[in-house]
Amino acid sequence: MLRKLLLPTLFAILCPIAYAVDGAPQKDGIEALREQGYSIRTISPIFSQLVAFSFPKGFTTVFEDAKATQYIRESVLAGENIQKWSQMVTITGAKGLAANPNITPQALANRLAGGFKNACPTSFSATGLGVFKLGANDAFGAVISCGVAKPGGDLYSESTLVVVIKGENDYYTIQWAERAEASTAPIKFDEAKWKGRFRRLMPIKLCPIVPGEPAPYPSCVGGVNGQA
């Protein structure tokens, strides 16, 4: 339910790529490469830039929607689906939003938090992870939670790690959400878990799209925190 709150505010055509950072060829998919000891990342051309991050183990893409100014792709754990899931990794893009002088990564994260709070005012909680740089790009991280995410329906809580990144022209988010047992009280921030998941998504970086460069986009491979 809460994932739908992100769509009106956020984010053409995406071609996600999973690759081994040492250049090994793909064989039997992402998990086969993991079993061989490779570190798996994705690089996706979304609007004006390439978006790269480390793809967590066990997830598979189940939903993708590309529009003229908004993009979203969602992945869940193997065996789960878009309706019934325990964890979800989402990447979004909002075309041209960086031109708005009133929008900052923190301000956009606050808007997302506001949507959660409206959905669960008595069990809402949020913890900011701070303003930081991903290479030359401004970014902000937060963990946002609803103790009861779907009043009147199946009872569960929903918490989301959100990383908001300001690109040259567009805004992007990378999110890692989980559903768990419902709680009438606000959910206490689990620092070890959420900072650990943040580290597992790193390195996150934005790269220029090189005209004519094919996947797996070697110009964007390598580097840390946006540094090629």
Image: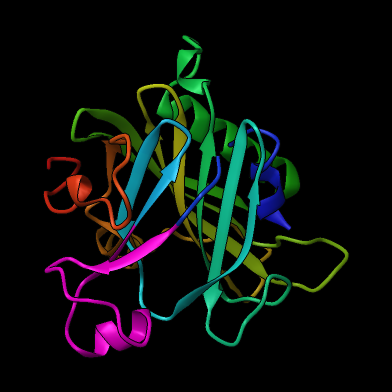
Membership of 48 in magenta stretch: no
**Residue 88 percent coordinates (x, y):** 54, 67
Q: Is residue 163 above or below residue 102?
A: below
Left or right of residue 223, residue 59 in this image: right
Label count reads 0
**Front residue of this view, candidates 187 and 13:** 13
From this viewpoint, which residue is outermost toward the top?
Answer: 101
Q: Residue at coordinates 22% horizontally, 53% vertically from top-left?
A: 203
Please give the range of residues in magenta. 16-42
Q: How is the image coloured?
A: rainbow
Q: Nearer the viewer, residue 89 or 1?
A: 89
Say which residue appears at 71% left-offset and 60% top-offset.
Answer: 149
Q: Nearer the viewer, residue 150 or 137?
A: 137
In the displayed structure, 15 sits above or below 129; it is below
**Residue at position x 37%, y 35% in the image:** 49
As drawn, is 122 to the left or to the right of 161?
A: right
Q: Residue at x 55, y 45 (%)?
A: 13
Q: Residue furthest right?
A: 152
Residue 10 in the image: state x and y as whole percent. Answer: 60, 36
Residue 37 in the magenta stretch? The answer is yes
**Front residue of this view, candidates 2 and 99:** 99
Residue 170 location (% of width, % of height): 46, 27
Q: Quadrant of the N terminus?
A: bottom right
In this picture, residue 175 sits left or right of residue 219:
right
- Quadrant of the frame with the C terminus: top left
Q: Quadrant of residue 208?
A: top left
- 140 shown above or below 136: below
Q: Position of residue 58 (x, y in %)?
A: 42, 81
